[in-house]
Image (spheres, coloured by chain):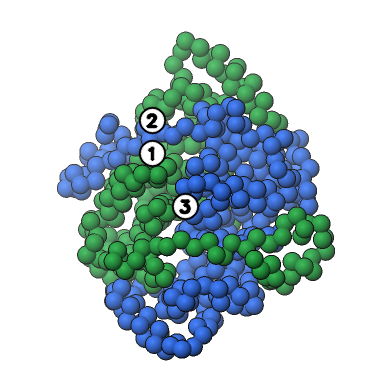
Chain colours: A blue, B green
Amino acid sequence: VNNSYKLVGKSVFNAPNLKIIMSVQFKDICDIRKPYKDETETFLEVHLESRDPIVLFGHWFEKARATPNIDEPNSMTLATVKSNGRPAARTVLMKGFGQDGFRFFTNYRGAKAQQIEQTPFAALVFYWPLLCRSVRVEGAVEKLDKLASDEYFNRRPRANQIAAHVSQNQSAPVSSRQALLDRQEKITNEFEGKEVTRPDFWGGYVVQPDLMEFWQGQGSRMSDRIVFTKKNETSGDFVQEGDNGWVYQRLEP
Amino acid sequence: VNNSYKLVGKSVFNAPNLKIIMSVQFKDICDIRKPYKDETETFLEVHLESRDPIVLFGHWFEKARATPNIDEPNSMTLATVKSNGRPAARTVLMKGFGQDGFRFFTNYRGAKAQQIEQTPFAALVFYWPLLCRSVRVEGAVEKLDKLASDEYFNRRPRANQIAAHVSQNQSAPVSSRQALLDRQEKITNEFEGKEVTRPDFWGGYVVQPDLMEFWQGQGSRMSDRIVFTKKNETSGDFVQEGDNGWVYQRLEP
């Protein structure tokens, strides 16, 4: 392992505090390198199961679900924009998808909800390394209606329903885990013998895609990328007609 | 499976094009639910291996590397902001980390590079579902210097070095995979018997963290979240002193 790397304008060996350097010497992991697909498994336009990217997503998602050792096929990164114009991101669980988009549920008072309120657009990334596949989504975000939020809330395990009430101001500082446990106990007692109703501050969103990219990692990093965009927003020599108002094209890897 | 969900303002059963609906009926996956940690494995402040988040990241990362079936422990989502102020995100491989930040390498002409050029801030998400752990990072992005980019480039497999030359305008449309293969063959021939030098348009970036959050998923969704921020930028009742210019606090899940 070579620790002589320099970062921009500053060598790790010239930093002012040697103690820091000793404890966090630059970790070089450049040689972690897994094989991707080889040329017998390229992802060509003729392999598209559908020219509607939502339907195509369904095929890829079902393949991920059916693949052993893909632990949470529905986990996705949700990227949003903060009030200072900088990006933020975290993992959430996708709870359904259809022609209108991708759904997830959360606390409407948390950081991501505040960001969506101000900039109602999101990017999603599904990544299934065991398949060497990824799907990227970009689109507008809308709140789901109360009925849909109720319906999903009512199907959650009771402990999760109670947890929604416990986290009253998601992302706000709290004194300790014990403070949360005390609140959990109090709320559990309050609901004893009763149905746990959805708190007003908890519910769903749907990300409505206007861009969907399908990526398959290939050997020698000659990876396949096919991106779908809305028909009226894209033109160019290499654009191909998709279904249901979409077009698609291949991108350089 | 209940397909009667409504999306905001529009039922999937009232949509204008029945053919679309038939082919992409709403996929309800709400009941995919994996167990997270239980209360014997809470992540408390006393469990922090370090109060320097970079050092703490090192501990978590090494645990991920040592865990069987974590396929690409160094894969991370990179979120950026587009010129229209909306978010974008994709998976990249982290190639090293240290006191100055997290490194990755890419094409300087691609979409993410253009976005970083305009808004030089990024968010990163590491997610290791088998550990029920995630680390989120936010910070400014800088280009690595040429020396560091050369050094990493020279260690890549030759085929990957050639691929960097082949993808001349990353994210630009291309006619077909065959067009890329033809270019790959031409460039391979040009370099025959010679060292493959790094193209000017390919190199590294470092994301310099000003926020790092450590998340551990817990049963009943009472998950643990401990966030580190720079000392001078954070105050409040629950802020605790960290090391090397950082403070930390627990957040509501």
Q: Nearer the viewer, mark 1 or mark 3?
A: 3
- Amino acid type of the residue tagged 2 in the rendering: Tyr
Q: Chain of mark 1?
A: B
Q: Circle 3 — which element? A: loop
Q: Quadrant of the C terminus of chain A?
A: top right
Tag 1–tag 2 contact (CB < 8 Å): yes
Question: What whole-number distance in Å separates the C-alpha atoms at marks 2 and 3?
Answer: 32 Å
Q: Are marks 1 and 2 on the same chain?
A: yes
- Could you say which is closer to the camera, residue B45 or residue B113? B45
Residue A199, label in figure: none
Question: How many numbered marks does the figure carry?
Answer: 3
Q: Which residue is mark 1?
A: B95
Q: Nearer the viewer, mark 2 or mark 3?
A: 3
Place residue A121 in its image quadrant: bottom right
Q: Which residue is mark 2?
A: B152
- Could you say which is closer to the camera, residue B78 or residue A154? A154
* Residue A211 appears in view: no
* Label 3 neighbour load within 10 Å: few <14, some 14-19, many 20+: some
Q: Residue at x 66, y 68 (%)?
A: B2
Q: Circle 1 — which element? A: loop
Question: What whole-number distance in Å separates the C-alpha atoms at marks 1 and 3?
Answer: 24 Å
Q: Nearer the viewer, mark 1 or mark 2?
A: 1
Q: Which residue is mark 3?
A: A71
- Amino acid type of the residue tagged 3 in the rendering: Asp
- Amino acid type of the residue tagged 1 in the rendering: Lys
Q: Percent x, y for residue B46? A: 22, 65
